[in-house]
Image (tube, grey):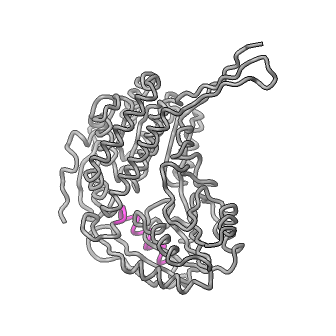
Amino acid sequence: MSDPMNVLAPEHRLLRIGDTWRGAASGATFTVENPATGKAIAEVADAGAADGLAALDAASKAMADWAATPPRKRSELLTATYRALIGRSEEVARLITLEMGKPLAEARAEVAYGAEFFRWFAEEAVRVEGRYSTAPGGGCRILTVPKPVGPCVFVTPWNFPLAMGTRKIAPALAAGCTTITKPAALTPLTMLLLARIMEEAGVPPGVVNVVTTKRAGEVVSALLSDRRTRKLSFTGSTEVGRGLLRQAAENVLRTSMELGGNAALIVCADADLDVAVDGAMVAKMRNTGESCIAANRIYVEEPVREDFTARFAARMAALSVGHGLDDGVDVGALIDEPSVAKVAELVADAVDRGARVLVGGRRPDGPGYFYPPTVLVDVPEDARMLTEEIFGPVAPIVSFTSDDEVMAKANDTEYGLAGYVFTRDLQRAIRFAEGLETGMLGVNRGLISDPSAPFGGVKQSGIGKEGSHEGILEYLDFTYAAIDLP
């Protein structure tokens, strides 16, 4: 399959700053590849620090008017964006597949999921409330007034190039904040298209700015060093998140961090194995395994280990691998060559330590960044893939004999983003929910992301929540006024 070279019109590959689309001040550009072929599909403006600060200028100038815009008007603009995204779902989905590699069916699902944040926060925009009460000791009244925090900087990852932006932009706009988004250099085109769609939906200039760059450190550092920036939201690795938190501390910025994960998926002997296998396939293989909430380790209770493993391995072996735009493809390309190399390295490490490969385990020949669905058993505790994010279609299976044992293994990690438990025993499920150190838990299901639910982790998996009512609170400050009234 040949790639359409004109993915976006040339003027749409520029930076979105204020009311203009423009190139980088230096004139620099960088290339975006299709990971299924390794071939270029677009040249995009490569911003520098000056461009980032120009975007902050625009966001700062637009801030007062946007904050004063009636909540109903902000809500209507978010609803208009939702409808526009749904109306152009196929166009957006194809672009996601071209620059990120996931199968088209998954890209369509991402558009539906990402658009839903605009609908959800359109409803939340008109429900931002303060509080009025009498002080317990009398003598004054307490007035609590919510206010938008101010211009926000968003740094988004490549694995969900639409949804990771919409779940930041939508609550920020609903709260009355303006935004600057720096999308991942591997997948900038989707965010540029979203900015165009929001412009056409009527979102005012300066409210949504997009700065594409391969010099992320330079641009983001300039933005975080400027006192006009009041909020940082980042989705990505824990290592990068730590560095951004250090920079954000200089100006005491509000921060939201959705960082790395090492999700354990636990299959108990009393589980419905049909449900468990279905759930494990979703939790492991959604987005080709390139998800921070992907099942990184699968623990199966000994009495059902062989049965579950046989069923799961058969399902993994039946998946088709190929270009995401081809019919019938279940598993697309990984994002780039380093990602494939890391997955292969983790598999080799596990095998060297005694693990056995049941399915997959060898990179196919040919162009593109592909790795097959892979299942390993007899994976020793010192295998790197049990402690590092795999971020690919590889599933290590480990047996356990007691809840205490598997709870300890699941919690033995610096991460605490997500987990999964399959059991038909309600009391057992509750014990796991209370005992597992995670921000989110799927019980008898492998899909847990939902715009109406608070998404976020504990420990070194992040700070704050995205989605749900809690999501808009991340973009609000509260002023307390004590009103004398004897």
* Quadrant where the N terminus is found in the figure: bottom left
Can residue 223 be seen in this snapshot? no
Measuring 49% from the left and 77% from the top, which residue is drawn there?
A: 274
Q: Which of 28 and 204 is in front in this view?
A: 204
State the image quarter where residue 155 is shown: top left
Q: Image check: 144 left or right of 65?
A: right
| Residue 177 position (above or below residue 143) | below
Residue 92, x across and y down, in percent: 29, 50
| Residue 313 position (above or below residue 333) | below
* Quadrant where the C terminus is found in the figure: top right
- Residue 342 belongs to the span the image colors magenta: yes
Measuring 56% from the left and 70% from the top, which residue is drawn there?
A: 265
| Residue 325 position (above or below residue 139) | below
Q: Image check: 124 left or right of 23?
A: right
Q: Nearer the viewer, residue 175 or 192?
A: 175
| Residue 58 position (above or below residue 427) | above
The residue stretch that appears in magenta: 333-348
Residue 309, x across and y down, in percent: 51, 82
Q: Nearer the viewer, residue 201 or 294?
A: 201
State the image quarter where residue 404 is shown: bottom right
Measuring 42% from the left and 65% from the top, which residue is drawn there?
A: 286
Measuring 38% from the left and 33% from the top, which residue is drawn there?
A: 76
- Residue 127 belongs to the span the image colors magenta: no
